[in-house]
Structures are given as structure tokens and as C-alpha cells.
Image (cartoon, rainbow, N blue to C red):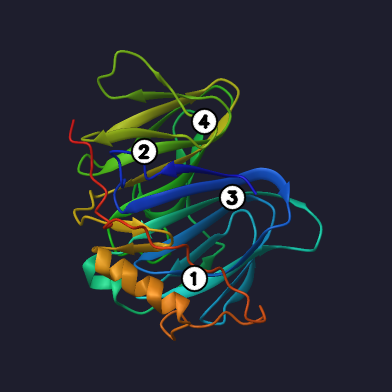
Amino acid sequence: MSVRRSLPQRGLPTVGAWCFLDRFGPQDVTMRVEPHPHMGLQTVTWPLSGEIRHRDTLGSDIVLRPGALNLMTSGEGIAHSEYSIGDEPTTLDALQLWVALPERARHGARGFETHTQLPRIALDAGGEAIIVMGTLAGAASPASTFTPLVGAEVTLSPGANATVPLNPDWEYAVVGLEGEHEVFVENSVGPTPGPADADLLYLGAGLGSVRLASGAGARLFLLGGEPFDDELVMWWNFVGRTHEEIVEAWKDWESRSERFGTVEGHGGKRIPAPPLPTVRLMPRARNQA
């Protein structure tokens, strides 16, 4: 199964509290992601096509479909699995994102939510947005968040020239899902060609709005949030603050500690952690240029 990673990037570890973005698909595949652990984060799964079965430590067992949000909060530790439906290859396409938990929440309770009723807002000149996480233009997703942020799917109809209101105190990025588009940033001389296939275009902070245009129609994902001040040490499926925290989580998973629990229905199958690196893990630095 091919996976394309757009965040983190060299010099850009986070956009708000968003610290990770993968897109798997579109592709025909039999997906079998066996139980694996997470800590210090929320996983946000947003299907674009196909169905994904999610099972986790808490006993959750649901089938996720396009238009629905899967949100898992790890706290100090949780495990989950992800399967496609059936034994034959099926068309899958989805975004999976991580939100770094702040200090007050990263040692808290683990949880799971699925939301099928998400707010939609009309943008001017042929645009519409689904608020997946957080807030945008006064509309708020019902999903649990622990820092001020937004994750929203934006659809542009053919000929659209839509303005998206932004919070100048936040930073933002745009991710292309399908179709060609242009991004007009305040005070820019001209348009910036938008990413058409899950590449991330960082917009920065200090913007009151961004204008998105498309001749033939397009779909995008908007990420944003209040800049996340904590320095993060990220390795494998763990988000911590120090090398020692990562090592402890690795040991707990490999020893089958109760910290991460058990995902039922897999007969003991699980993904082993890779070997720890031989160097000390350090926080990912932000490019200050």
C-alpha cells in the first residue's frame, strides 16, 4: 500500500498542533494494518473513498465511510487496527492526520469518537467547507480538541473564486486532494499554484483570509491552528517531549505492557516496534528563516 507523507517536513514540524499527515490512495488494495500503538496524540482519519474498519483498545469496532470523521485520543497509550472490508482488493483513499496533545492532555484519558454529522458552511463564489475539526468562520465541529485549530475539507465548484476567512493569530496550510487550483494570499503579487495531490502548501501566519480559485473544480483540505509552542520528539507512532519518553513507550509496547491495552479479534497479531535508533532522539526544529 503506497502512502504519501506531507507533514512533518524539514523545517516545518507542525502547523498549529497538526504534526503529521499521510494520504493512502487512491489505490486498489487489501488493507491489513495490524494492532499498533500511539501515545501523545489524536489520530484523525478522513476517508475520501472506500470503507475502513477500525478496532481499538477501548473495544471500539466501527466501519468508517466517506463524510465521517474517526477521532482517537491516545493519552499515555492506546492501540488500534485498520482493515479494508472483505478479502479482495478494494478502492481506498483517505487522509490520516495526527494532532499533538498539549501537556495538560497528553497524560489524560484515552478516547474514541466517530462523527457523521459535521457542519458545512457556504463560502462566497462557489466554495463550500466541511468543518472536520475545530472552528472556521464561526462554525465548530463536535469533535474533541485540546488546542485551538481547524481541519476543513473545501470543495470548489468549476469557476470558483472563494474567500476563506482566517484567524491572523493562527498559521495555516493547504493540502490538495483533487483538481487543479490556485491560492491567492493577501498582499501577494499573483497566485500560487495549489498542490493537486496531497502536497502541503504552507501559508504561514498573519493572514485574515485566503482566496482559492479553480477553473474545473477542486477539493482541498485546510489545516490551521494556534502555533504549537512545545518542542516535540516524534518517532514511529509516538509523540513525546524527550528521548527517554520514547524509549519507555518502546519498551512498554515490546513487553506487551497493559499501558497500550489489547485490540480484540486479532489472535495476538500486532506490529512490532522497529529497533530504536542508535543516536539520541531530538526535537524537530522549525526553520526560522
The Cα–Cα distance between marks 2 and 4, rounded to whole angstroms, is 20 Å
Of tags 3 and 4, the one toward the viewer is 3
Q: Callout 2, which amino acid?
A: Ala
Residue 238, position as x, y percentages in the image: 38, 64
Q: Front-most of 61 and 261?
A: 261
The Cα–Cα distance between marks 1 and 3, rounded to whole angstroms, is 17 Å
Q: Give the residue displayed 62% in from the left and 82% down from the top.
A: 264
Residue 68, position as x, y percentages in the image: 57, 59
The Cα–Cα distance between marks 1 and 4, rounded to whole angstroms, is 31 Å
Q: Earlier in the sequence, mark 3 or mark 2?
A: 3
Q: Mark 3 points at which residue?
A: 94
Give the label on residue 113, or none. 1
Q: Which of marks 1 and 3 is nearer the N terminus?
A: 3
Q: Callout 4, which amino acid?
A: Gly
- Residue 174 appears left or right of 70: left
Q: Earlier in the sequence, mark 3 or mark 4?
A: 3
Q: Which of marks 1 and 4 is nearer the N terminus?
A: 1
Q: Mark 2 points at which residue?
A: 173
Give the label on residue 126, or none. 4
The Cα–Cα distance between marks 2 and 1, rounded to whole angstroms, is 25 Å
Q: Residues within 10 Å of mark 1 (few under 14, many from 20)?
A: some
* Label 2 residue SS: strand
